[in-house]
Image (cartoon, rainbow, N blue to C red):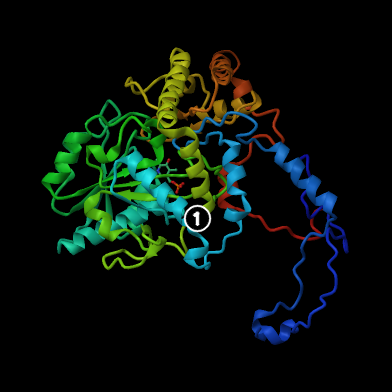
Amino acid sequence: MAGPEPLIFEISGRGKSGVKLPEPDVPCQPLEELLPPDALRDELPLLPEVTEPEAVRHFVRLSALNYHVDKGLYPLGSCTMKYNPKVNEALARLPGFESLHPFQPERTVQGALQLMAELGAYLCEIAGLAGVSLQPAAGAHGELTGLMMIRAYHEHRGRPRKYVLVPDSAHGTNPASVTISGYEAVQVRSNEHGRVDLDDLRRKANEETAALMLTNPNTLGIFEVEVEEIRRILDSVGALFYMDGANLNALLGVVRPGDFGVDVLHFNLHKTFSTPHGGGGPGAGPVGVSERLVPFLPKPIVRKAEDGYHFDWHRPQSVGRVLAFWGHFLVMVRAYTYIRMLGPEGLRQVAETAVLNANYLLSRLRGSFDVPYSERPMHEFVLSGDRQKQKGVKTLDMAKRLLDLGFHAPTIYFPLIVHEALMVEPTETESKRTLDEFAEAMLQVAREAEEDPDRLRSAPQSTPVGRLDEARASRELNVRYEWGRAG
Ligand SMILES: *Cc1c(COP(=O)(O)O)cnc(C)c1O
């Protein structure tokens, strides 16, 4: 289908250019002398050639076709796509932060090291944990780092183990990280309340269990109230307690996971602590640990000494480095700014508002959609499109219709344990007015499912492109432009 904006290849013309560089006035070696012959191309690549205004307008037009969080609500469950204060961006762009080089000597980057040390201390305080590494590049990387430390801990005690328990409501990265770290994932069932089934946990926990990975609140948005019993079950077999902290905005300033016995927790700075994400980053997934895992943290760690801040490399039991250099520093600047701007009271208000917004929205939608779990949710909730499915309208159709009504669709078909799932997280940053507009759109969709199902099945009608064959697009992905084929 032809979109409203041509490909940049289609506006290309031979010899057009947006830059004009002066001839170099220093001697430079020919490429042939710098690189071995087999590293040189025979022909130049056929890249698009456009003028500066053509390039700028092309990308601005594309950006205006896109939906983004500066344009409207992004009600994606599980991923906290919230609006991020612009002051974070202003500070991340300060030349003193932006232009740092990772090879600079410690004494020239004392401010950056102080920021890292203080951010680490804030994260420890927020989670009730004893130590933190800021290195991991994203949440899933934090999971892997946490599992590496869990392995190091068990091996140090001379008892390497085999399994990691993962509830069936877990985010897909949890079992994936377990597998990549060399453990085997064992699934634990959820009960009818949408919480971990403790009997199933007791059956599956044994002396070969390295840890349980629990998301809390879980991906149904429900708080696992039985964490203390879970801790006892894990203690009885010597297993560690990992908590996936991606949903931390529901808990900030209210609950500290370390206080209920969590040993490892990863933070998603790009979710809870407000860095724009989507499209692949950059993010940051610091990982915090309880006292007994501190020796295994990745190195180096920033430490304060009498004469200033230093990288501490002398950590003989460390799992080593998990990233080149020190972590995604400008994401840390944004998180630090966010925490300092809000302060303890503000952080608590984040959690309270996140929970209030989700519950308000659910109360407006409850009458028109099936609600599979009756428990009061925290920061996100899951609806089922089963009732509409009986009228021949799939959850996918409803999600597409929402695009016509000016909203990004919620997460659909996840978590897997809910039929026709529609998962919504409004986040704490949205006003009642926005929540009401979204509720009206959802209620209209539910009405149309009864009265005008064809309209939903043919949605979206108002977007730049209509319904795409998504399965085919991902199986036969073709992103290579062939010159001369199109007009
Ligand atoms: C987003 C998310 C992850 C993974 O984090 P990434 O930064 O995307 O790697 C893990 N668990 C939960 C519950 C999440 O929402």
Direction from residue 456 to residue 153 in the image, left or right:
left
Residue that carries the numbered disc 1 in the rendered image: 112
Q: Is residue 270 visible?
A: no
Q: Residue furthest left?
A: 236
Q: Residue at x 20, y 63 (%)?
A: 155
Q: Secondary structure at mark 1?
A: helix
Q: Nearer the viewer, residue 423 or 263?
A: 263
For the residue marked with disc 1, what is the amino acid? Ala
Residue 302 location, quadrant? bottom left
Q: Quadrant of residue 27?
A: bottom right
Rendering coords of residue 259 (x, y %): 24, 38
Percent across and percent down for residue 194 are 30, 29
Q: Is residue 125 above or below residue 134?
A: above
- Please tell me which residue lies in front, 192 or 334: 334
Q: Is residue 24 left or right of residue 143?
A: right
Which of the pair 160/337 is nearer the observer? Answer: 337
Q: Pick out the residue farthest to the bottom.
A: 33
Label 1 CA crowd tier, 10 Å (few <14, some 14–19, many 20+): some
Ligand 1, what quadrant?
Answer: top left
Horizontal relation, residue 231 to residue 486: left or right: left
Expressed as whole percent of the image width and height from the top left, the position of residue 227 reads: 22, 35
Give the number of marks: 1
Q: Quadrant of the N terminus?
A: top right
Mark 1 residue CB less than 8 A from any atom of ligand 1: no
> Relative to 165, does residue 380 appear above or below in the rendering?
above
Residue 361 visible in the current orientation: yes
User: x%, y% of residue 102?
Assistant: 52, 64
Q: Residue at x 48, y 44 (%)?
A: 336
